[in-house]
Image (cartoon, grey):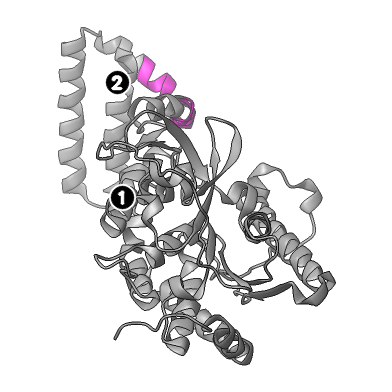
Amino acid sequence: MRYFVLIASDQLASTSLRCFNGCTAARSVLESWAERLCALVCMMLGVDRIQYIRLSRMLRSKLFWWGLVVLLVLTFPTLHMLFAPDEIHLLQVPAASVDFPAHFAFNKKVHNPLRVLVLPGGGIRGIISVHILAYLEKKTQRPISDLFDLIVATSTGSVIAVGLTLPDANGRPRYSAARVEELYIAKAQDFFKVSVWHRLLTLNGLLGPLFVNAHKTAALHSLMGDTLFADLITPTAILAYSVQQSNPVIFTNWREAGYQFYAWTLVDGATSPPGFYSPVRVPTIDYAASDTLIDGAVFANNPAMFAYLAAQQNYPQHKVIMLSLGTGTSTPRFENSGTGRWGLLHWGRRIIDLILVANSEYVTHNLTHLAKKEKDGRLSFYDFDVEIAQGHDNPFDSSPAHIANMQEYAQLMILQNKRVLDELAAQLSVNTIAVKK
């Protein structure tokens, strides 16, 4: 090891000399410095000067430096395991006792037809969904929590769903959709915040989660506070995947989960896609149990089918009006030849995009077909989405320019579907309470 230290110091000096080859004075100074440094190191390590010179001449080549690079690459995973944060992000919540009601109920004050809102995942592209909801609120002069009897959400949709149904001191919505959009944009930098050191340590997400959970956790907690999931104004379901149980899990605020968890903790777990965030261990409010969650988009990025089943299970005699608000579609294109030779390195994120897009298209196709087959119009299915250009589809880009692009796509969606949106707004606003000025 002593010889390698000597070689490295001598090679550093030689490299510096080549950089200043055109300057005689600098070269003279560096030669003197290199000679004294090598002599000092030899004296400290007890290495014979002649042995050092022979070894230096033998190894002073590109082979040495390539070997050093290979050594660093091989040892990097070990360094990552030593210095990277824990794999499981454990939430700390205020301890409280669980107080279950005498009986559980979905919600007796529902409309017929039952009005259902579906909010899929999509990262920062959730701005598109909440922008459309702000348009509906403006058009109807009523809050989203009054326009819908059931909200079902996955991933970033759960942030919007909870934000729209948080109660204020009077039991009315704390935030309007426009305000949720503003807060969503303001917190976006925290959701996707990552330091240069973390990028280096994980090789930009290759050897560990790309983002740090702590920033997202703090942002969600500040936005939602310690509101129980059961206290949300509207019946709400959040989809996640339990790493602990190796099963999809669906948290509904009208069942036991509503009284066992704070809303922000479930959202934190449901917005943690693997590879981008660490799994989140979510404890109950009394710490009696916990579950380790990742993003529900791994099995249902578009939860519309579950929303329909939940409506049928709780109110089988009701008709259903369902609104599914997409976060923009960007179908991966493979015009170039050679895909038959691609491996994991080439497919990379493309395979994730393919899975998410295929899932959403499959669900949309089935529900559209089902709506046509249902007798007496028992299911009215509205699906709104917009095509996003390649390069604008990054769900983790929180730059102001990218956010502005998402708002422009939302406006485009409104222009393309204005007549249908206005008709839907009229249907949804029947027998609802007007928004307070």
Q: For numbered disc 2, what is the local secondary structure?
A: helix
Residue 277 figure quarter? top left
Vertical comparison of 270 with 408: above or below: above
Please state, as top left, top right, bottom left or bottom right, where the C terminus lies in the image: bottom left
Residue 391 figure quarter? bottom right
Q: Residues within 10 Å of mark 2 (few under 14, many from 20)?
A: few
Instruction: Find out whether residue 73 is within the magenta segment.
Output: yes
Q: Position of residue 167 (x, y in %)?
A: 32, 64
Image position of 31 (left or right of 219): left
Query: Is 435 or 324 nearer to us in this picture?
Result: 435
Q: Amino acid at mark 2?
A: Val
Q: Going 27% across and 37% down the picture, which residue do you hit? A: 96
The residue tagged 1 is 215
The residue tagged 2 is 5
Q: Position of residue 112 (x, y in %)?
A: 62, 73
The reply to whether residue 210 is in sight is no
Q: Position of residue 170 (x, y in %)?
A: 26, 68
Q: Residues within 10 Å of mark 1 (few under 14, many from 20)?
A: some
Q: Going 66% across and 54% down the picture, which residue do you hit? A: 313
The reply to whether residue 2 is in sight is yes
Query: Is 39 or 105 nearer to us in this picture?
Result: 105
Q: For numbered disc 1, what is the local secondary structure?
A: helix
Residue 278 figure quarter? top left
Nearer the N terminus, badge 1 or badge 2?
2
Vertical comparison of 167 with 136: above or below: above
The magenta segment: 55-74
Please state, as top left, top right, bottom left or bottom right, where the N terminus lies in the image: top left
Distance from Cα at disc 1 to Cα at disc 2: 40 Å
Q: Amino acid at mark 1?
A: His
Contact? badges 1 and 2 (CB < 8 Å) = no
